[in-house]
Image: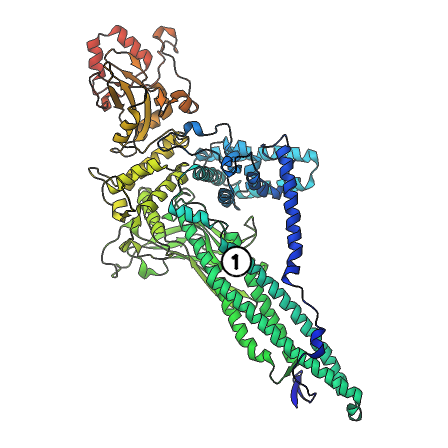
């Protein structure tokens, strides 16, 4: 005799028989296999691949191939982003993937000015990048500025001076107004074609841009400037022949086996959960049938229950009960297996993948390749959360079935509580891991230098929840705080001013991600109530690390989950002059450790290897000034860092050697020297640096070795080793007896370059020999590029002709231009002194030479008042 419980009512049951499915098991509906469920997907993918092949063939045969696609030939506005990036994957000739690069890498020691493709726009170069670099481009354009607009107005955008505009509000307003005019022109052309979808999408984008930036044109100027700069950085990375160990590891990550394994396993878990849903539906139907038959038997008179028909019906009910018991055990077993698979995927692979993404984010913060893969992680996090919530609902359904029918040995009350507990624990873990800082804190004025914040200056930071569920839209309020754990702060404490509580939503993100961006937070220093006794040694301000913490609470489907995450350590400064050393601290921390929170790091900073540091230094140039360093340039920096020629092995470098100890015989550190060069390039010689005209990092010995066998007039440009932020040029000449001579002009600093562009200096530079005949000794840029070919496009104006006072001028004045002039004696091989650099026009010099005696001219040229 067994006891059945139906609706809370116990009833006797003596149907006999063992718990076996009997005939009912053979009648169970067959579940579709994994192969069958994936067949439609494979068919769809094969169809799309075939269509893409046809499109590629049409594009190759099209007379418009290579032109930027327009609204007319695009299927839909929202497809432009995919079109722009997919265009680069189209085969271009038989050269393979290498032929798609925008430049060819320079040979060691060579100058790459002639190797660029001047006729190709930057956006066209971007579209020819290889897929691994296109992924980085895709990361640049998110919800702040649509890639569609970049594609639509590519040439016009590149022709505007956005860098000047973001510091000039009237100029930014004019550019924004002109951008809307350009969009309206495209809208008018599309309207004539009567393409309703494109008209709608273009109007929508224009409306969004107007709402976001009409009242703040400086913001869009800054955004576009940053986007263009990041494009140049990626292009520079693509053109560099040498990859360091960090970048190689990041490159190898793309398309990794682990990522494919995550996607495959996630898909299998989703399919298994769907099959379990079908099992529960079948179990529900079976139990309803059993309930109906059982009620029918219970209503029959006692005399009729011993009839052969009734005995047969009782046997049938017993078989049904056996089947119900088997199916309940089977469903619970499948659920337990799914939970085990989710647990293994989360803890063995997914969390490790997330940690790798966070490490890539650290590297990207200090100038490395842009991190990608977050959308794939979001897909997996969301899929697993949905599967776990679906199993929770299935367990609730089993509980409903349990209330209607239970029996001795029922597996549901035995297994359901433990299974539900494991599912809840996994959901807690998933949600806590999925709450991340997508974009680390940075000031809009210094986007290339995140994690350095200035007091009372606004900064932006973006949070994201990788579990994208519609029920959470506008339901999660995030609170930002700083220095919450005051005991870890050595000297100073801060609070955040501005809007520090905001709701996450899917509307502000172009991809519909569940995120929130704080744009108006300001750190404010608090007066300390006392010193920190735990830290006996006073810490340098730029070595203090602080943390911004974000907290929220999720209430979903009966669960309450507290979430917390933190930014990478930030450095707080109160003066812009502290920015270089603060940035050095950010570089060193994120290079040397993968710890996300170690605020006491600089109490005992970890050394780094020379190869790692050189790679990051090259990133500083590619990210900040658009062109990285080649192997020869890095070799010179390595020798400067370790003080000797590199032989073999990888040297260890300390934090003090990098940023605190003075270079031998100098009054400044290595980092101060390098930072001054970056600033010089950025503000005064950026186009020349991007074009590869500047060799830059070469010592005097190597310089002479390169020039000694070149024809007279060959010169190269290098950065000064003795002056901060100085650039000089050295040329080779032959004396009357055929002796090779080298001449180096006094380094030009930002003061001189502010008055006269460097390209114009190279064009107009004159040397006065003992014959008092001014001539330009600079003829060929190393190795043998004619000067005007290398620098012609950078000249600010046409060369001025030497004019006599009687030949022109306004109202009787003699026309003049400033021309750098040096005087070099034939018997002197020393570099000219500062007094040899004279701002003298050729016309003035000609007049003076005609009317003054040689002795008077000599006195004038040597006067200390002749120099600037």
Q: Nearer the viewer, residue 826 or 842?
A: 826
Where, by quadrant of the figure, is residue 33 drawn?
bottom right
- In the rendered image, residue 562, in percent from the top left (x then y), is placed at 47, 65
Question: What residue did someone put label 1 on?
Answer: 262
Query: For mark 1, does the 10 Å Cα neighbourhood hold few (<14), some (14 to 19), or many (20 or more) residues?
Result: some
* Up/down of 785 relative to 101, above or below: above
The quarter of the image holding the C terminus is top left
Q: Residue at x 21, y 9 (%)?
A: 854
- In the rendered image, residue 634, in percent from the top left (x then y), is placed at 33, 38
In the visual, does 372 lie left or right of 27? left
Where, by quadrant of the figure, is residue 710 drawn?
top left
- In the rendered image, residue 847, in percent from the top left (x then y), is placed at 29, 8
Q: Nearer the viewer, residue 842 or 627?
A: 627
Q: Element at badge 1?
A: helix
Q: Nearer the viewer, residue 815 or 741?
A: 741
* Up/down of 273 relative to 682, above or below: below
Q: Residue at x 37, y 56 (%)?
A: 595
């Amino acid at each position: 005799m067994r006891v059945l419980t139906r609706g809370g009512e116990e009833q006797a049951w003596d149907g006999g028989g063992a718990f076996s499915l009997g005939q009912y098991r053979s009648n169970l509906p067959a579940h579709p296999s994994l192969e069958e469920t994936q067949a439609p997907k494979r068919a769809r993918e094969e169809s799309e691949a075939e269509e893409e092949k046809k499109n590629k063939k049409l594009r190759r045969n099209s007379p418009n191939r290579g032109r930027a696609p327009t609204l007319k030939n695009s299927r839909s506005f929202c497809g432009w982003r995919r079109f722009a990036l997919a265009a680069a994957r189209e085969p271009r000739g038989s050269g393979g993937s290498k032929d798609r690069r925008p430049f060819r890498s320079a040979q060691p020691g060579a100058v790459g000015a002639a190797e660029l493709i001047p006729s190709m726009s930057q956006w066209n170069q971007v579209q020819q990048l290889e897929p691994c670099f296109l992924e980085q481009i895709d990361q640049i354009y998110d919800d702040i500025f649509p890639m569609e607009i970049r594609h639509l107005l590519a040439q016009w955008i590149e022709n505007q001076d956005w860098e000047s505009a973001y510091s000039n509000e009237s100029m930014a307003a004019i550019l924004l107004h002109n951008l809307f005019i350009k969009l309206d022109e495209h809208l008018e052309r599309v309207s004539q074609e009567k393409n309703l979808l494109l008209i709608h999408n273009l109007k929508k984008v224009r409306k969004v841009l107007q709402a976001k930036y009409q009242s703040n044109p400086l913001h869009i100027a800054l955004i576009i400037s940053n986007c263009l700069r990041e494009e140049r950085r990626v292009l520079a990375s693509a053109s560099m022949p040498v990859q360091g160990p960090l970048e190689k590891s990041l490159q190898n990550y793309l398309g990794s086996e682990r990522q494919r394994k995550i996607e495959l396993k996630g898909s299998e878990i989703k399919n298994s959960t769907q099959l379990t849903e079908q099992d529960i539906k079948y179990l529900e139907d079976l139990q309803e049938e059993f309930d109906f038959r059982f009620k029918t038997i219970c209503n029959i008179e006692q005399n009729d229950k011993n009839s052969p028909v009734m005995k047969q019906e009782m046997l049938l009910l017993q078989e049904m009960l056996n089947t119900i018991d088997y199916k309940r055990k089977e469903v619970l077993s499948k659920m337990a297996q799914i939970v085990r698979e989710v647990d293994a995927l989360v803890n063995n692979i997914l969390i490790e993948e997330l940690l790798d993404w966070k490490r890539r984010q650290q590297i990207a913060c200090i100038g490395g390749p842009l991190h990608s893969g977050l959308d794939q992680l979001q897909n997996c996090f969301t899929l697993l959360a949905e599967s776990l919530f679906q199993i929770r609902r299935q367990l609730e359904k089993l509980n409903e079935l349990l209330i209607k029918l239970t029996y001795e040995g029922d597996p549901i009350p035995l297994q359901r509580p433990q299974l539900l507990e494991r599912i809840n624990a996994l959901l807690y873990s998933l949600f806590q891991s999925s709450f991340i800082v997508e974009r680390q804190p940075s000031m809009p004025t210094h986007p290339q230098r995140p994690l350095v914040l200035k007091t009372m200056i606004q900064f932006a930071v973006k949070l994201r929840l990788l579990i994208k569920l519609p029920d959470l839209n506008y339901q999660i309020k995030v609170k930002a705080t700083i220095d919450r754990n005051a005991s870890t702060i050595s000297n100073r404490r801060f609070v955040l001013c501005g809007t520090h509580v905001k709701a996450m939503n899917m509307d502000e993100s172009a991809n519909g991600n569940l995120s929130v961006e704080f744009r108006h937070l300001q750190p404010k220093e608090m007066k300390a109530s006392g010193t920190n006794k735990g830290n006996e040694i006073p810490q340098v301000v730029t070595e203090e690390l602080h943390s911004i913490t974000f907290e929220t609470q999720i209430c979903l489907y009966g669960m309450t989950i507290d979430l917390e995450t933190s930014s990478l350590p930030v450095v707080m400064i109160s003066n812009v002059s502290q920015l270089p050393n603060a940035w050095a601290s950010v570089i060193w921390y994120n290079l040397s450790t993968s710890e996300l929170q170690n605020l006491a790091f600089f109490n005992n900073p970890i050394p780094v290897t020379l190869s790692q540091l050189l790679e990051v230094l090259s990133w500083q140039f590619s990210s900040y000034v658009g062109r990285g360093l080649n192997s020869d340039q890095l070799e010179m920096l390595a020798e400067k860092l370790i003080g000797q020629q590199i032989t073999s092995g990888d040297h260890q470098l300390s934090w003090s050697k990098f940023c605190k100890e003075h270079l031998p015989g100098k009054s400044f550190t290595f980092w101060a020297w390098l930072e001054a060069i970056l600033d010089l390039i950025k503000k005064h010689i950026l186009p020349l640096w991007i074009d590869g005209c500047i060799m830059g990092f070469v010592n005097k010995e190597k310089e002479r070795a390169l020039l000694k066998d070149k024809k007279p007039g060959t010169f190269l440009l290098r950065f000064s080793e003795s002056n901060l932020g100085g650039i000089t040029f050295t040329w080779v000449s032959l004396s009357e007896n055929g002796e090779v001579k080298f001449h180096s002009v006094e380094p030009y600093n930002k003061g001189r370059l502010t008055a006269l562009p460097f390209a114009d200096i190279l064009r107009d530079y004159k040397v006065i020999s003992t014959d008092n005949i001014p001539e330009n000794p600079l003829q060929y840029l190393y190795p043998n590029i004619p000067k005007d070919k290398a620098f012609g496009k950078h000249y600010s104006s046409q060369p001025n002709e030497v004019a006599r006072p009687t030949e022109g001028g306004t109202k009787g004045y003699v026309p003049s231009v400033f021309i750098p002039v040096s005087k070099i004696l034939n018997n002197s091989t020393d570099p000219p002194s500062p007094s040899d650099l004279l701002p003298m026009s050729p016309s003035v010099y000609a007049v003076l030479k005609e009317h003054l005696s040689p002795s008077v001219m000599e006195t004038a040229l040597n006067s200390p008042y002749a120099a600037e």
